[in-house]
Image: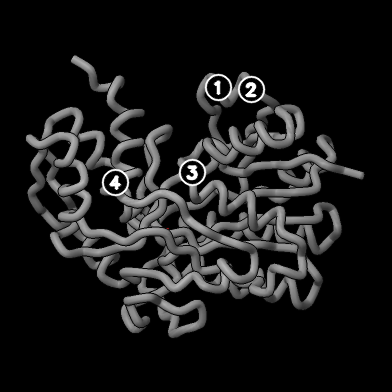
């Protein structure tokens, strides 16, 4: 039986840490990392790597055949803030890459898919507190529209063609290993870098902008768990709500000040404010908890402690 994993978009914020986690779990040679550009030294040294454009069906198919891949994690995407600047490019990347992978599974060339969705599938008409799994979804961003459409296609391919696709609506993901690119929740990462470097941060969202967030360790664990669960447990084939914690810029500032008392924040909201205002403040993820045992571990202070500990050495002197 084929038993190798392909990660598309392995050099991004999630892909980088997912590659490490999957290589640790299944063995380096079983996990083929790929992206449109080369990764860092660790990525290139620790196992097979291929340059692949996720919008190119033949390129993916060739690698699937060459390495006898049966599982694909599609992490390539354009995030919310960048997608507003390049709408058609974002649509093309986010949708074509998904169709490529779904069609490979439909044609029985691969057996299982992970595809990330996002809190961006919700919009201004969605109930913002404890946002339910099933609710009004009228996303107002290009990124959100692509994720919402993607969710519908995932469920369609599952129902029509039996494609085993699994998905999570990630909240904002906080991590220290790789910088995120082009998201609205990215302030919650940048703030730690600036706290260590300048002891102050100018935030592009205003005070009181509460958003759902998760630490990378929890996000990776959720991803591995949903992929390992037996198929009958995955009752939702669009995408699962996933919650961990929620906070606004003032609360993360207070958490950082516990360790760096001299730190201060000021506010200069830009176009990303409107994006954040259209998203939920907190998430009801009871289905993920009931169906496949999701449980988050990191609260805000634990995240702050780990972020500052790991980023600290980078900004010494
Ligand atoms: N973190 C993403 C963004 O801000 C949302 O999925 O775009």
Mark 4 closeness class: few <14, some 14–19, many ≥20 residues within 10 Å: some
Q: Earlier in the sequence, mark 2 or mark 4?
A: 2
Mark 3 closeness class: few <14, some 14–19, many ≥20 residues within 10 Å: some
| Callout 4: CB less than 8 Å from ligand 1 | no
Determine contact: label 1, label 2, CB under 8 Å: yes
Q: Nearer the viewer, residue 109 or 36?
A: 109
Label of residue 46 in the image: 2
At horizontal 21% and vertical 60% (from top left) the residue drawn is 271
- Residue 290 is left or right of residue 104, and the answer is left
Q: Earlier in the sequence, mark 4 or mark 1?
A: 1
Label of residue 28 in the image: none
- Secondary structure under tag 2 reads loop
Give the labeled residue for mark 3.
Answer: 217
Mark 2 closeness class: few <14, some 14–19, many ≥20 residues within 10 Å: some
- Asked whether residue 173 appears in the rendered view, the answer is yes
Give the labeled residue for mark 4.
Answer: 301
- Residue 126 is left or right of residue 30, and the answer is left
Please identify, in this view, whether the residue under mark 2 or under mark 3 is nearer the observer: 3
The x and y percentages for residue 259 are 19, 36
In the rendered image, which quarter contains the C terminus? top left
**Residue at mark 2 to residue at mark 4: CA–CA distance:** 32 Å
């Amino acid at each position: 039986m084929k038993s190798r994993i392909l990660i598309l978009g392995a050099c991004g914020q999630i892909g980088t840490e997912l590659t490490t986690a999957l290589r640790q779990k299944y063995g380096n040679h079983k996990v083929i990392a790929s992206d449109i550009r080369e990764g860092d030294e660790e990525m290139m040294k620790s196992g097979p790597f291929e340059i692949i454009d996720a919008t190119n069906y033949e390129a993916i198919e060739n690698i699937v055949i060459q390495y006898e891949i049966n599982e694909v994690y599609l992490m390539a995407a354009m995030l919310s803030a960048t997608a507003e600047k390049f709408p058609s490019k974002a649509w093309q990347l986010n949708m074509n890459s998904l169709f490529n992978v779904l069609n490979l599974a439909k044609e029985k060339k691969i057996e299982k898919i992970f595809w990330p969705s996002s809190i961006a599938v919700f919009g201004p008409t969605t109930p913002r507190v404890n946002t339910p799994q099933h609710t009004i979804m009228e996303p107002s961003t290009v990124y959100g529209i692509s994720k919402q459409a993607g969710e519908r296609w995932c469920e369609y391919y599952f129902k029509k063609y039996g494609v085993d696709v699994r998905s999570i609506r990630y909240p904002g993901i906080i991590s220290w290993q790789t910088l995120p690119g082009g998201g609205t929740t990215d302030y919650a990462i940048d703030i730690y870098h600036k706290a260590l470097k300048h002891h102050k941060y100018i935030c592009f969202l205003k005070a009181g902008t509460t958003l759902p967030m998760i630490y990378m360790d929890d996000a990776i664990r959720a991803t591995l768990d949903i992929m390992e669960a037996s198929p009958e447990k995955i009752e939702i084939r669009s995408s699962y709500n996933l919650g961990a914690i929620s906070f606004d810029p003032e609360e993360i500032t207070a958490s950082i000040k516990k360790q760096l008392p001299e730190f201060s924040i000021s506010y200069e909201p830009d176009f990303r404010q409107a994006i954040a205002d259209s998203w939920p403040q907190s998430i009801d993820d009871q289905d993920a908890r009931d169906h496949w045992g999701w449980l988050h571990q990191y609260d805000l202070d634990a995240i702050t402690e780990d972020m500052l500990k790991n980023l600290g050495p980078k900004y010494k002197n």
